[in-house]
Each structure stands twice: as C-alpha cells, then as structure tokens.
Amino acid sequence: EVQLVESGGGLVQPGGSLRLSCAASGFTFRRSDMNWVRQAPGKGPEWVSTIDSGGRTLSANSVKGRFIISRDNAKNTLYLQMNRLEPEDTALYYCTAGPNWGSPIRGQGTQVTVSS
C-alpha cells in the first residue's frame, strides 16, 4: 500500500522556522519525483517545491530563498526546511509523489500556522 505521512507542522511566530517531513512507503521512493504542495483556507492547492529522483530542485517564487526541499533516500523521507516564515505561509502542507505535483498520491498533510 502506497502511503505518505507528513509531520512537523505547528504554530510558529513570523520569522521563525519549521522542518516538515514526509515518510514514504509502498513504492520505490528513490526513483520518484517528490513535491510539496500547500493549501490555505479558502484557496486552491499551490505548488511549493519539487525534487526529482536525481536531486534537482525547483521552488515557487513565493518561497525561493526561504524554503529548502531535500530527500533522504536511505530513510524514504522527504523534507521541507522552512525559514523566515510569514503569515502568508499559513496552510495545510502535504507531499505528493510523481512528476505531476497534483498527483493523487498524497498524504493527509500537516498544518502550519504562522502568527504572533
């Protein structure tokens, strides 16, 4: 069974940092492109960042220079290091597997709230 489980969200003050994790199982993680996606209340899903099977990364302009996507293939885990968080980053963050960030292979998500 394919499974993605996110963790690491929480409440943080503006300017703070969080590190999200996505534990994968049930498929060959090291061969899969992986994505982070977020959805703010009342808005549609928004692509955040992608890392391909070769380790190449892409990020949305809104998070470039603040968020870093990475992966540990030995642990079947995807990460998102989020720095200098802003209230606009408040959203449910989830990971997806595959070359299309809108893939139905996704986790339940972890809530990130940025507020003073």
Image (cartoon, helix red, strand yellow):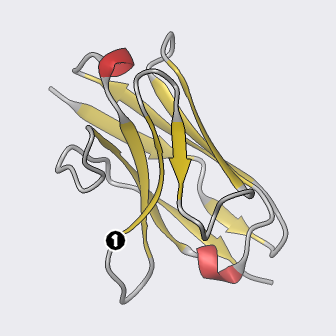
Pick whichever, 104 or 113, lies toward us.
104
Which residue corresponds to the image point at 32% horizontal and 53% vertical from the top-left?
108
Image-based side of 98 in relation to 61, left or right: left
Q: What's the residue at 36%, 89% (across, down)?
A: 42
Q: Position of residue 87 (x, y in %)?
A: 68, 82
**At which x and y percent is residue 98?**
26, 37
Q: Residue at x 61, y 71 (%)?
A: 62
Crowding at label 1, few (<14), some or many (≥20) Cα neighbours within 10 Å? Answer: some
Residue 50's place in the image compared with 1, above or below, is: below
Q: Which residue is mark 1?
A: 45
Vertical position of residue 109 compared to residue 106: above or below: below
Mark 1: which secondary structure? loop
Quadrant in the picture for the C terminus:
bottom right
Residue 40 placed where, x, y %? 45, 79
Q: Position of residue 67 (x, y in %)?
A: 67, 53
Q: Determine whether, in the image, residue 97 is placed left or right of residue 14.
A: left
Residue 5 located left or right of residue 79: left
Amino acid identity at mark 1:
Pro
Question: Is 102 situated above or below 70?
Answer: below
Q: Determine which quarter of the picture holds residue 79.
A: top right
Q: Left of 40 or right of it: where is 15? A: right
Outermost residue, top side: 74
